[in-house]
Structure formats: C-alpha cells, structure tokens
Image (cartoon, rainbow, N blue to C red):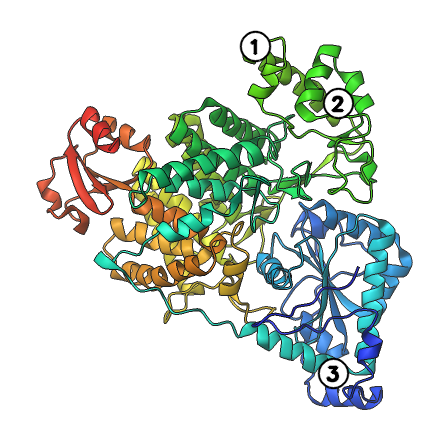
Amino acid sequence: MATSSIHKKHFPLVLTITLLMTSILMFGCRSNSDEAEESATSNSQDTAFEKAPLREGQSSLLDKQTSSSVNWQSWHKDLFKQANNERRIVFALIGSGTDINTLDALDQINQSASLSNLLKSNHINTLIDTNLHPDIEHYMALICMNSKIPINSPILAWFSYEGNLVSWSPLYSKSTEEVEQVIRRTSNTVQNLWLESPEYTLANSRKDNDARSIIRVPEPAEAGPGNTLSLVGPISRNKSLFDPVSDTIDNALNLTPARYIDLMVRASNLPELSSHQRQQCLQTAIRVTDKMLIYGLIDPLDGGVFIGYEGMTHTLPKFSKTLRAQALSMMSLYRLYEATQDAKYLKAANGILAYTQKHLALEGGSVALGISYRSDTPQNQPCLWTFAEIEKALTPQELDIATRAFGLSKLGNIPLIDDPKKIYYRKNSLTWKTTLPELAKHSSTGTKALTKSLEGIAKKLEALRSQKPSKPTREKLSTASSLATYSSACVSGYRATGNTSQLKIAKNTLTYIRDHFIDQSGDLYRAMYNNQLNDIPAKGADYVMVCQAALDMHEVTLDPGWLEFAHEIHTKMNQRLKNHETGFIAEYDGTGYPRDYPTYAYYTLYGIDNDNTWAIANSNAKRLSLRLTDESLTEQANQLDGIMLRTAQISAPASIDYLSRESIARSTRVYLKRPISEPLFAIARSKPCQIIAVSDSGSYPELDIEPSEMKAGTATVILGGKKIGAAASPKELQALLSQ
C-alpha cells in the first residue's frame, strides 16, 4: 500500500514517503548528511523538556500499552522538545480504544520484537488516543479527505521535531504481515530521508504545514428580505445527498446516518419550506432510517448500534458500539416517531436505550464510551457466524426465518466487494436483507408471531455469542461531549413518550457532568476514567454539547438552575476558546500540535458526522439570548450566523448541525407565563418546539407585548417569528401547535 499524500489548491503536496523516495533524493535538495545535520542543529535550540511515558489512569487504550516494548510516550507539550533535543522523527499511532483495527495493530506491533526495536531505534514514539484528543483525529481526517483517501483507523503519522507532518497513512489491512510491512517500509524510508537530508525534510514538511494553515474563511452571507437567511437551498442540497438507488449518503463516510436523519425530520417542520418540500424531507428521513439504520446498523441480537460499515453494501458493520452512536441514533428515532407515530421507530429507540443502560452504564453514574468486539483472528470475529453455528442453535422453523431475514448462506453472505481478500469466507453477518413486512409475506405466521420468533432467535444467538472465546472489550473512559449527547437523547425520548424514567436518566447524566467534570474554578475537563478526572481540558465540542444538554434539560423542566449552568458553561467556553473579533470557537486551546489547526476546513469537508462547534455554539447563544438579557449572546450569534449560512452554501454536509438547529429555531416557540400551567406545559413538551418561561423581569421582544400583559398560566405561540395566537387551555394550545 502506498503512503498517502495531499495535492489540493489549499493543501500542497505533503512530503509523501514511498519506496520511490530514493529517486527524489537525487535532486538538488540532497546534501551531505553530516553538513545537513550540523545545519539543522544550528537552526534549532535545545530546550529543557520532560519525557512523558504512558501512565495508567488515562484510558484503557493507553493503560494496556504502558508495558509495551515500544516505549510509547503520551501526546504532550514537551514531546517535540525532546525530539528537537535528540534530532529524531516522531512516530504517532493515532487511534482509539473503541476501534478494533487500532487494538489489532498494537497487538501486531507488540508481537514483533524486530518491529518494536525498529520503532525504538528510529523514532520517538507516541500513542494518541483520539477519544482524548479528537482535534488530532480531525486534523488527520481533514488530510485524508483532501487527498481523496478513505478515512480509516488507525492512522500512522511521522512528524518532524517542529511538529510538522513528514508522512502519513491510514492503516487498512487486517493482515499481520501487511501491517508490519507498511510500518517497517515507511519508517525505514522516513529515517533514511532524515539521515540523508534533515534540512530537506524540515523545509518541506514546514512548507506543507504552512500551506495547510492558510485557510480563508469566506465572507459571511448577507441577509435577505426581512433580515432572514433562506434555508431552502441548503436543506435541499442536503436532501439530495441521499441516493435512493445505491442506498448511500454522499460524504457519510460509512458512519451512522443519525445526524442526517435528524436534519430531515427537523426540516419537515420548517414553515419556510413548502408542504411538498417538507413531505420530501420526511420521506427521506424514513427511507434512510429504514434502509441504513434499522436494517443495517442496529444489532438484531441486543439492540445496540454499530458505529458504521466496512465497505459499501451495508452488509459488514464496524464491530464497535460507541455511546455517541447510541445517543444520536436514539435522538433521530425518537424525533421520527414524533413525526410519524410509527411504533417501529419507538421500539428501535427504546431498544437502543435498553442496550446502553445494560452494557455501557458504569458504577458511580457514568456511561462508558463504547464497546468493541475483538478476536484473535478475523475468522473468529464473535459478530460473524458460520451457517453451522446458527443451524445448531436454532429450530428448523427458526433457522428458516433467520435465513430469510439475514440472507444466511453456507458460503457466507458477505459480498466480495466488501471482503476482496476473503478474510471472512464462509462467515455470515446478521444484518437484515429484508424488512419485517416483506419477511411476513413469506412466512406462515402473522407479524406478531413473527416478531416473537425473531425475539427468540435473538436471545438464543446473543447467548451463544456471549459464550464465544472472544469477549467484548469495554472502554471505561467517559467524555463530557458523549455524556451530554446521551442526556439530550434521553430528553428527546421524554418529549416523545412522556416517560419520566428517561427524564431521570437525562438528569442524572447531566448532573454527573456538573459534579465530576468541572473543577473548583469552573473549568470543564474532557474525560473521566475509572472515576478519576483526566487532566485534559475540555475541547470545543465538550463545551457546546454540555451547554446544549443543559438547555434541553431546562426546556423540559423550566428549572432555572439548568439555565444558569448552561450560561456558565457557554461563558467559560468563550473565555477559553472564543476569538472575540470573529466570534469563532476554537476546537482546543492552541497549546499543542498540529499548529494552526484549520477548523473551518474541517467543518467544510468532514461535517456529516462531526459535531460542528461553531454551529452549536451559535444555536446555544440564540437559545440563551431568548431567556437571558445579555447583548453579548446576540452579538455572538450574529457573528456566526452569516458564516454558517455561507458554509451551508459551500458544503451541504458541513451545515447539518446549523440547519437542524435553525429549523427548530425558525419553527415554533411556546412562551409560558409564570406560574406555569402544568397541562399547558405538558402539551408543549410533546411537540417539536422551543419552550420559554416568561417572567415580568425578563425581556422578550418576539412577544411584542409587555410580559406583564400575559395572564399567568397562559401560553403565547410564535411561528416563523410571528405571533399566531395565545392559549389558556390545553385544547387551545393543541390547536395552535397543530397549525
């Protein structure tokens, strides 16, 4: 496999290292190695540094490698000082403890004494857990996207001691031989180049990094008539990303389509769209949910959601289940249930919730980041089955149903396009090959009896899977952003069903964040591991998701404490990460590498499964400004509005978060005058709207009346920015919200 490279308008060629590099060295950049080394030394200053070997207590991924012969170091501020002092290349393996391929690659490195020795001899080696450092993952994903290379984990990267990329490559292979070959080949070539001409290596990697950092944020879009920016075009472009012929979403990167579904459902309530356009959005959400989520990614045995697909046919899932994937999928399903009242979406969402509570809940109140299903060899993958295994476990009638449902075959059901090397030959994946109604047509039993039979099949096979030698590996790490997303998902469930147990889960999860992820100075941190707070400051996504979750909680409880908490988190984020001239929010505090991380470009190119910090911060500022008298909130929202709409015009996937939240913001708001009438509040909670408590001390320009003119216990409804009526009874409010 050739090492990847970049060649784009704003991303000139990265110094690509291949076996052909020796021919490149024939050009004039080559110099005497001794002279080059001396020159490189003279251009750098030795600085004091502190080595930081992996220490336990950060994450399970790092814990397991503390005794590795590679002598991995943590990703830390002094890493490049050490590399500078020793004049060495930094090798980084970038992956996560919830990724099977990362865990397999590390096992293969540790099992090869010669490879471990090579890495130790040539480089300073750092292991980067992307669950702790998502900014590094984003940076490498951006580079992959620009070079039109499929993103895969782990990613191998070689840095100069200045912190600039020298070479990089996603690691695709599951074969021990090929993994070792890729690492050995590239490591040797990088090292040879470095010894031959460090000046050349430094200069070119520096040039490429500088080029990547020069990313211009476009001019904001101007407001149209009535000072309103149209969402019709951007939503239509997002809708067209779904190809009903191939059943794929452009730029989805084979990941869960939950955020895309969420946008389509929310857009179906947007008054700005015509009734036909709203219906099209809803039908797109239904189509994607049925074909890609329910019958593709939801594990039929335990109800959990796999993070995505291997290949293109939706046949072979990535055998990992993260908390984020569960939360996003729950949220999209609950909202689709609200829109359609189709019980299958409610059942699927409740199944995911049950899975999460059973398999990911941790002692102390936290929730694990995810689970991976691993095996000693690909053929022993516990989520794949021989026909004989299934045949032995089921009755003949059950086997017939399972064979039809999952397309089982004695030769295996994984298409060659997804498994070109036949790694999974004669293996079957339990992904649906038909729908329940279609299966019922070919069954002698009715839908209810068929459903019961499928539940029995699932129980038998889940029990069998639990007895396989290879057990699921749980990453006990928790992050603020994933927990917050989970809390928001449970709030969505409460609004859709009125089930107070879901509200309790949401409240407990958010309370856990407030009590355990924030220090005495009010600073938010990113991660908790084994009930111990990590020393890694919160990233941009952590701040905005926690703020959003607190606002969601306030909206369904009207507890002023959650509004205060949301404001505190938003304020702290602005103190830590806001550019006060532009209003933009950085992903991290800028103290590490890679330098000058191009946030905007990342959102533009890799947005369909990324929490867009700018968009969510924009939404949070707007929601807070409706409830609090703070002109700075409105100013910040205005700063981000135009640029987010221009982003939507440039890149549909990058605008999903913005459009989702704008669709709600421009749809319906219900103002409830204190003291609140619980029957009116209950009606409002059950509808897709924003709920705002009105007091005489607040300022609510949208109402066009003094708050004191509203009668206590009544509601005023705003649709598309216009007052459409007031309600004093549940019946009246129901009628207004049905318009």
Residue 589 vertical placement versus 307 (above, below): below
Q: Could you tell me how many numbered marks the image carries?
A: 3
Q: Amino acid at mark 2?
A: Leu
Point out the frontmost of discs 3 and 2: 3
Labels 3 & 1 near each other (Cβ < 8 A) = no
Report the residue at 72% width, 21% height from top.
Answer: 403
Q: Earlier in the sequence, mark 1 or mark 2?
A: 1
Q: Is residue 508 visible?
A: no
Dot 3: what SS?
helix
Dot 1: what SS?
loop
The percent position of residue 381, horizontal first and vertical second, equals 78, 35
Residue 303 vertical placement versus 706 (above, below): above
The percent position of residue 702, horizontal first and vertical second, equals 18, 49
Of the pair 195 and 171, the residue shown nearer to us: 171
Q: Which residue does the numbered mark 3 point to in the structure image?
A: 200
Q: Earlier in the sequence, mark 3 or mark 2?
A: 3
Residue 543 vertical placement versus 188 (above, below): above
| Label 2 neighbour load within 10 Å: few <14, some 14-19, many 20+ | some
The answer to whether residue 217 is left or right of residue 417 is: left
The answer to whether residue 675 is left or right of residue 601 is: left
Q: Amino acid at mark 1?
A: Gly
Q: Which residue does the numbered mark 1 point to in the structure image?
A: 446
| Label 3 neighbour load within 10 Å: few <14, some 14-19, many 20+ | many
The percent position of residue 74, horizontal first and vertical second, equals 69, 61
Q: Which residue does the numbered mark 2 point to in the structure image?
A: 464
